[in-house]
Amino acid sequence: MDWFAKWFNTPYYHILYKNRNEEEAQEFIINLIKYLSLPIDSKILDLACGKGRHSIFLNKLGYNVTGVDLATKSIEEAKIQENEKLHFFVGDMRETNFPNEFNAILNLFTSFGYFSDDADNLKVYQSVYEQLKPQGIFVMDFMNASLAETNLVEKEDKEVDGILFHLQRKTENDFIIKDIHFSDNGEDFHFQERVKAFKLDYFENLAKIVGFKLKRVFGDYQLNEFDSKRSPRLILIFEK
Ligand SMILES: C[S@@+](CC[C@H](N)C(=O)[O-])C[C@H]1O[C@@H](n2cnc3c(N)ncnc32)[C@H](O)[C@@H]1O
């Protein structure tokens, strides 16, 4: 089984990252909506939505939102929040198929770069393109891989909810790899995250192949300009 199909569906993934900054996520959405001037009747797809933190907030703002994720457990939990303008589905971003359905598609918080075969990345871009209405917007929020590589912390221990996670990071064949070791209830666990360290030019090329126009590149959730040496994020705004 691929690492991402396994790890994201365990309770341990949610424990390790439970202190994610919700306020920051909401601030990003507010900034994005303002920049995009997205009309309130827009239909939005949150691709790789996890438990739906961005979807739920967008829906609270009044938008019609669909969230899709591969992790069945996350979608089960997100579904509790469903309403007539908020829906969640289990699905693979390589295969989601709602042709010509959305005004905007979001892929947030480094939910890309997981596949071992680069052809799958193109599949995602093609599928996103087909699901957008004409002039639809695709937002990709990826890590700034250059900065992540420069600042790579090789070893780190993190205790969350009484579990001591041992994290080890390295780069290998263009992937940033995080090994996660811990014990729980007397059992030893090992999971791995593998994210390909794509830079801006890779996304520009994918966009060109598919037919997207790259409109803007931001470097953080406050939507400051991207600077490969300093920006924490690489946020790309594409238009169909
Ligand atoms: C880093 S998390 C981000 C989740 C969410 N966007 C957020 O910000 O909370 C990455 C998510 O991508 C999902 N994912 C990984 N591979 C996927 C795929 N092939 N199709 C759909 N979702 C996928 C995982 O299950 C996980 O929920």
Image (spheres, grey):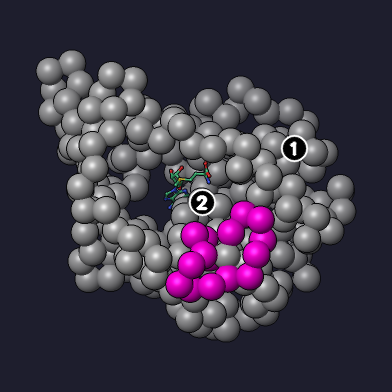
Q: Is mark 2 within 8 Å of ligand 1?
A: yes
Q: Position of residue 106 (x, y in %)?
A: 62, 55
Would residue 235 be found to the left or right of residue 74 on screen?
right
Q: Is residue 95 above or below residue 30?
A: below
Disc 2 + disc 1, Cβ < 8 Å: no
Which residue in the structure is indicated by mark 2? Answer: 109
Q: Position of residue 90 (x, y in %)?
A: 51, 40
Crowding at mark 2 (Cα within 10 Å: few <14, some 14-19, many 20+): some
Q: Position of residue 136 (x, y in %)?
A: 74, 66
- Residue 61 lies in quadrant: top right
Q: Is residue 228 above or below residue 168?
A: below
Would residue 211 be found to the left or right of residue 168 on screen?
right
Which residue in the structure is indicated by mark 1? Answer: 59
* Mark 2: amino acid: Phe
Magenta part of the chain: 220-234
Residue at left offset 65%, top offset 77%? 214
Q: Is mark 1 within 8 Å of ligand 1?
A: no
Residue at left offset 21%, top offset 59%? 170
Question: On residue 193, which mark appears?
Answer: none
C-alpha separation, residue under disc 2 versus residue under disc 1 = 18 Å
Q: Nearer the viewer, residue 32 or 211?
A: 32
* Mark 1: amino acid: Asn
Residue 95 visible to the viewer: no
Q: Position of residue 68 (x, y in %)?
A: 56, 44
